Amino acid sequence: MSRCRHIVVGLGLAVAIGLALGIPAAHPQSRSAPAAASTDAQGERRGPVIGTRHMVVAAHPLAAAAGREILRQGGSAVDAAIAIQMVLTLVEPQSSGIGGGGFLVHYDASNRRIETFDGRETAPAAATAEMFLDAEGRPVVNSEAQVGGRAVATPGMLRMLEIAHEAYGRLPWARLFEPAMRLARDGFPISPRLAQLIAQDGALRGMPAPRAYFFDERGNPRQAGDQLANDALFETFRIIANGGAQAFYTGAIARDVVEAVRASPVNPGVLQRGDLESYVALRREPVCGGYRDYRICGMGPPASGGVAVIQTLGMLQRFELARMAPNSAETVHVISEAVRLAFADRAHYLADSDFVEVPVQRLLDPDYLEQRSRLIALDRSLPAVPVGQPLGTQNPPVPRAAALDPIELPGTTHISVVDGAGNSVAMTTSIENVFGSRVFVRGFLLNSHMTDFALRPRDGDELAINRIEPRKRPRSAMAPTIVMNADGQLVATLGSPGGARSISFVVRGLVAMLDWGYDVQASLALPLHATTGGPVVLEQGTPLAEAAPSLRQMGHDVVFRRLMSGLGAIAVVRRDGSAQLQGGSDP
């Protein structure tokens, strides 16, 4: 049950916390960008947060404070990320949590090695490729498909965090739950953002369990500043803290999760106890590629973000972006064309590599990317974006219908951490839609990641590469990213929510830091532009509006939207022989 009382507070949407000591690293000389200067909610100018000991960047102040608490106790970057994620399950339930999944990229400072962890959800064993088709064989409307038990895939979050902790944790597992348990027991103030989303979400009101938590006894949505406790989640955390991830995947919690999915009042699902009991998180090889003097590493399939980001940067290598103005039509055009080419490959080649052969190394081959880059002209947009044929493949690719691809939604969060030993985590996690499936059990929401599969499994004789198959992981655009210099030293850790647009957001942040030399806060405060292969979306109410006429003249379909990235990053800057951590977030 929830307990609620009113208290007036102010909470920022993102925060970076740093303290002081020193770690060796290198980064280009940073400069701030007056035209892109960040401001807070009150319009005050912001620079990067500075520290030289350790730092976290998270989407909520209470989550960032939990990460700092763990680092101060001697915890590792992985320890801090786990504590942050538990708090976000409570205070930012609309975006991520233990009922979802994600990807973790880890940098080990002792050997300058990158390792990645796959906690992506899997389709239940009883899932079928046709489960989201209506009686006429047409896909159910996305807004309907995403609500209820049918949308729930087997959560992977806790298994992933447990194997990462076994590899790189320093503090006991149970201690990492203490900050979240305190907040669940004593209550936390609802942020303005959460309150707004509750009030706007009609599907949430229509489900009895979340309605009882997110709305008061009279049916009114909880207000910003209300102090909300979550006794059910406190007890769930207590069980997992004492019993490990196994306590989530078996026993009473697993029983209740399955019952909530299968008895959902909207779209009952097919999840079974065996799906939870058999779930396995995976340690995978990272995907890496060169850009200028740097090495960019991210998550491989079933994540597409790592491949798409590295492909995009590889195609941008031949352009002198450092000479281009950040908000110019030329810059937006060149970056957008590279992203469009990467998305064409993504649609054709990227899916769960345990089910589909994905030619990752061929897609990232510098010669192949140079070949793709030559399709980009400076004065006009490609009228149609061809799928590439990576070097060494035997047959020309058959184009895949874009209609088979799902719409990926921004119910996601990103966490960046650098610990006192210089180890780093970039972790992006999600429950897919805002408030996920709206299935609420034991104090947390379950994901809606089944709708990240192609809901229409075939177009004529052509099968969707990302179609639903039992135990398969849906393709994801999440792009947690770590940057190193030529010596393997940590340069930056970053990532972003934003659905499929997050790929463009991460590329924009990287170009700002690595090509234009902006400090991390100025880099993430730049006006946003994005594409997922179709129109170029420009952030409305920004200087990018001046680029629109030229972009349209080049042949781009240009639209304006209120874009919010959720970008969070930590850069490691060396000056005069000393290292400094700089943290930033998109205001």
Image (cartoon, rainbow, N blue to C red):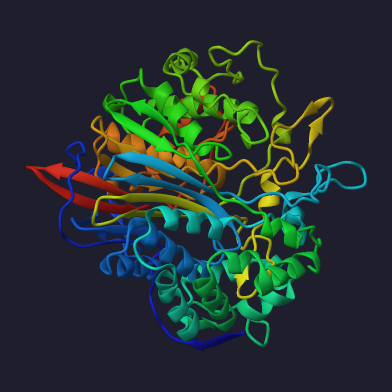
Where residue 469 appears, x then y in whole percent? 75, 42
Residue 502 versus residue 311: which sits nearer the camera? 311
Q: Is residue 226 above or below residue 140?
A: below
The residue most toward the right is 135
Q: Is residue 244 shown left or right of residue 547? A: right
The foreground one among 166 and 542 is 166
Q: Residue at position x 30%, y 57% from top?
A: 39
Count of labels in the image? 0
Q: Position of residue 404 (x, y in %)?
A: 73, 35
Q: Which quarter shows the C terminus?
A: bottom left
On the image, which quarter does residue 488 sit in? top left
Please identify the residue farthest to the left as the structure is shown: 576
Image height of 162 relative to 442, above or below? above
Quadrant of the image for the N terminus? bottom right
Q: Nearer the viewer, residue 331 or 507?
A: 507
Q: Residue at x 49, y 59 (%)?
A: 162
Q: Examine the rendering and report whether any part of residue 464 can be seen.
A: yes
- Relative placement, left or right, of 241 versus 296 is right
Identity of the residue drawn at 42% across and 42% down: 115
**Does residue 148 appear in the picture of this structure?**
no
In the image, residue 454 lies at what x, y percent? 72, 40
> In the figure, 144 relative to 174: above or below?
above
Residue 173 position within the rendered picture, expressed as x and y whole percent measured from the top left: 43, 67
